[in-house]
Structure formats: C-alpha cells, structure tokens
C-alpha cells in the first residue's frame, strides 16, 4: 500500500508537531532553569580532549542536571515518537503512514519551528520510532557497531555510528519507505552532529584510547 496523499500529509504534519516537543527543554525548565542547553563542552575520558556539542538534547541536560534529568528528557523524546507512530500503524495498518510520521518526528526534533530550528540530534526519537517500525533493527545495529567499536578501540564508533547500519538492514529487510526513513535519519543525524563528529575524530587521531 502506497498510502493516500491526504493520510501521508496528515502523518507528516502530526509527526513534525510531536517532534518539535523537546524533552530536554521541558525537563530543563524544572531541573536546570535558565541554563543554556544549546552548547555543552564534553571532555573525552582518558584523553583530556574536549568536544563542544551544539544540540539541545537529553545528554546536554544530563551534563547540567544529572542522570535523572537526562533520563526523563530521553523518555519524553522516545515516547513522542513511539506513541504517535504506533497510533499511525494502528490507524493505517497496511500503509507507510507510520514510517512517514516517524521520519517527520525526526525532522521536528532536529529542526523545531517553535525553537528557531535549534533542536537535538535525534537519537531518542529514532529509537522510539524504530520500536514500532522494526524492533530488531536498532538491536542488531547497536550490538553490531558496539562490537566493531570495541574491536578497533574507538568509543565513537561503538556508540554513535550504529544508525549507518539501518540503511543496509532496511535495504534487505524493509521496503523503499523504510530505506527512505533510514537515509533521512542518517542525513539528519550526521549533518546535525558534523562538528562533534569531526572533533571526536581529531581527538581520536591524537590519542587512540577510547
């Protein structure tokens, strides 16, 4: 089923609006009032090198308000993708609307209109959407890239690069809609985190310790 233009448009708009809700900002108002979550300096363990993250994310909140605040923000971001994606799958069980909605959640999360297009990186809502789209996909990709990162001694590969695996996974196990979702998820993530990725790579070249 290719889905009707109207239902696909509805799914896209609803997904974007849900995505624009920021768990970090919601929890941050209570846990870290007045804090600027848009820039976070991260010191890489064991090396002393620092990378500046420029996204409003649960990780940024965690750095300022502790693990509890970060976990609550992450839970909100997971649920804001999981719940509407699941609803779309129940409403349109034979169509791709739930995949379109999950993709739109990512766009809204990374580029929220209500916050001048300054959002997060998309990890939590990506997990929330994938739970509904294809639960084994993130499990296999996370485990595979964790093993790869461990084998080469690179924590960045182990933790951050697993979304790349979604593209070949869905090329084999999915259809053009899920492949499109995987490509969109990677484009958004890598473009949004390009500065951090370059900084992490340069730090790794100076010191290969994870």
Image (tube, rainbow, N blue to C red):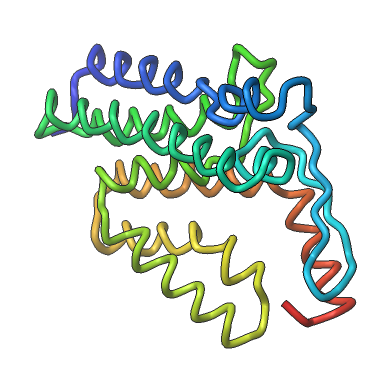
Q: Nearer the viewer, residue 188 or 159?
A: 159
* Residue 200, horizontal then vertical, whole percent: 78, 63
Residue at 57% in and 65% down: 159
Residue at 79% in and 58% down: 198
Residue at 49% in and 57% down: 163
Residue projecting furthest to the bottom:
151
Residue 162 vs 106, above or below: the answer is below
Instruction: Please tell me in which quadrant of the rendered image residue 17 appears.
Output: top left
Q: Is residue 162 left or right of residue 1?
A: right
Q: Nearer the viewer, residue 78 or 188?
A: 78
Q: Is residue 138 left or right of residue 183?
A: left
* Residue 46, horizontal then vertical, whole percent: 81, 75
Q: Is residue 109 left or right of residue 126?
A: right
Give the quadrant of the N terminus. Answer: top left
* Residue 22, horizontal then vertical, whole percent: 55, 25
Residue 17 vs 132, above or below: the answer is above
Give the quadrant of the C terminus. Answer: bottom right
Q: Nearer the viewer, residue 135 or 26?
A: 26
Instruction: Please tell me in which quadrant of the rendered image residue 202 appears.
Output: bottom right
């Amino acid at each position: 089923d290719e889905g009707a233009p109207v239902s696909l448009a509805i799914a896209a708009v609803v997904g974007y609006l849900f995505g624009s809700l920021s768990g970090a900002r919601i929890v941050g108002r209570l846990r870290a009032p007045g804090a600027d979550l848009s820039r976070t300096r991260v010191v890489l363990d064991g090396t002393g090198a620092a990378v500046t993250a420029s996204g409003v994310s649960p990780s940024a909140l965690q750095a300022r308000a502790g693990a509890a605040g970060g976990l609550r923000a992450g839970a909100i971001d997971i649920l804001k993708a999981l719940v509407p994606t699941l609803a779309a799958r129940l409403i349109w069980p034979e169509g791709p609307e739930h995949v379109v909605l999950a993709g739109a959640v990512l766009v809204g999360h990374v580029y929220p209109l209500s916050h001048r297009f300054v959002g997060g990186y998309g990890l939590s809502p990506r997990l929330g959407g994938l739970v509904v789209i294809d639960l084994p996909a993130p499990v296999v990709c996370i485990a595979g890239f964790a093993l790869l990162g461990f084998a080469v001694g690179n924590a960045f590969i182990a933790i951050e690069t697993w979304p790349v695996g979604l593209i070949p996974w869905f090329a084999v196990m999915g259809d053009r809609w899920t492949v499109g979702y995987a490509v969109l998820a990677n484009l958004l993530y890598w473009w949004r985190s390009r500065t951090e990725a370059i900084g992490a790579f340069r730090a790794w070249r100076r010191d290969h310790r994870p």
